[in-house]
Amino acid sequence: MTDETRSRDPHTLAGAYALDAIDHDTDRLRFEHHLARCAECAQELRGLVETAARLGQAAAVEPPAALRERVMAEIGQVRQLPPLLLPGSSGPGPSPFTRWWPRLAAGLAAACLIAAVALGAVLIQTRDQLEQARAGNRQIAAVLAAPDARTVTGSGVDGHGATGTVVVSRSQGRLVFASSGLAALPDGKTYQLWEITSGRMRSAGLLRPDASGAIPPVVAAGAGRADQVGLTVEPAGGSAQPTTRPLLLLDLRTA
Amino acid sequence: MRAKRALRLAGGRGPGTARESPEDGSGPEELLERVARGDRAAFEHLYDLVAGPVYGLVLRVLRDPAQSEEVAQEVLVEIWRSAARYERGRGSAMSWVMTIAHRRAVDRVRTAQSAVDREDRVARLEVRRPFDEVAESVEGRLERERLRRCLDGLTELQRESVTFAYYGGYSYREVSELLKVPLATVKTRMRDGLIRMRDCMGVER
């Protein structure tokens, strides 16, 4: 019954969408699909999003001073994304829709549609990022909840201050890795995680600690047979094989 | 000092002025465009404008200060990271920032609560009435009065649908369950409630 109601008029979801109150992916995708084809809806949504933002601004609270320092420290290690180049975007120069597509005449419907598609694409892209995060969380949860999940914790090789924890599930073929006490690396260096199986090293990805030196849990596939997990410092972009001694080495065979 | 300025700018302006950027290139839109080119000084200015609203909104949704600080940090770094994805033609910089902040906060709520029993959630929701708390923490007096007046102009169902969703981080299904109102009605109230707020607050479209 509710599905029927939803499909009948996705337009009514504009308010819920602007309030991030749609927790159902199917609903959201259906609305975004609708949005990409309905310039009027995209325009309405924009006003509603702006209104919601005003509610948000009204909640302003002075943030802790330490937040500023942490943010400023962290951005030094964060690569910025390039602009999104969309087919149909207006490119450099003044956009025809400066400020909120304000007084668009009905005759501008075609231009409006392009902007609607672009807006839809941006919304979907943001959603993709959220979906990726959610998918990651689900994978982590699956490993942690697996009946054969085993935990290995170790501290740094050679008295290095880092500690690491691996939860491995052979049945899931995945492991979850988290670490803390890692030093911030200079530009041009990165942490790289390795899975070691019968002496063969396989990269499990590049990792960047947060401002507190911690790597939040990440999931790595292919852990069905891994004997060990190691963490090394590598040149930015990572290496095909480790070029430095591991600062963390966790033995999964005992797990 | 910096934060005070942020609060004043965030809360104390009249309708429409959010997008009247100063000539000196220090409006949020100009700053964001400079940030997109890697300008750290511009980011520090932008931080002063948005950190209060971002932290306040995340705190309102999550309640837990430590967690809110963490999420606010993620949001502010995300602004730095994806500044080039902002396009002025698509809306105000402030709205872009607040959208990121709200989504992150809500996502955190939904991840954290996914394991919690629905009944528990509704029971807890019952004791918090976001609207009453709005007035306590809004810093900009004019904006606060305007917001209160506009919220007062909504029907009770519109007001509860909008505020439970936005400040409470609840989905329309949860709001429907809480208020014992059909889903279709909640969706409609969220939309017409926001439309009425938009018109009342003089939000540019």
Image (tube, helix red, strand yellow):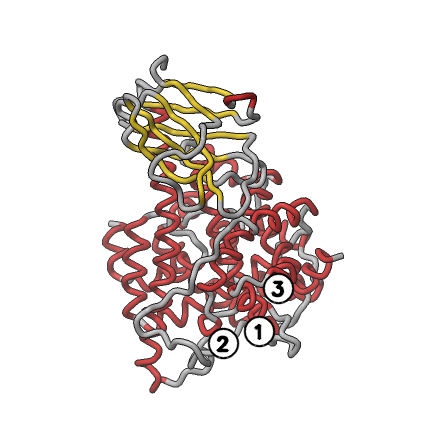
Do callouts 2 and 3 point to residues on the same chain? no
Do callouts 2 and 1 point to residues on the same chain? no
- Most foreground residue, B23 or A254: A254
Indicate which label's residue lies in the foreground, 2 or 3: 3
Q: Quadrant of the C terminus of chain A?
A: top left
- The first of marks 3 and 1 along the sequence is 1
| Dot label at residue B19 | 1
Q: How crowded is the residue under tag 1: few (<14 C-alpha within 10 Å), some, or many (20+)?
A: some
Residue B156 can be seen in this image: no
Please, is residue B5 above or below residue A98 in the view? Answer: above
Q: Looking at numbered disc 3 in the image, what kind of residue is underneath it?
A: Ala
User: Which chain's residue wears label 2?
Assistant: A
Residue assigned mark 2: A99
Please say if the residues under marks 2 and 1 sit with CB atoms less than 8 Å apart. yes
Please say if the residues under marks 2 and 3 sit with CB atoms less than 8 Å apart. no
- Most foreground residue, A70 or A186: A186
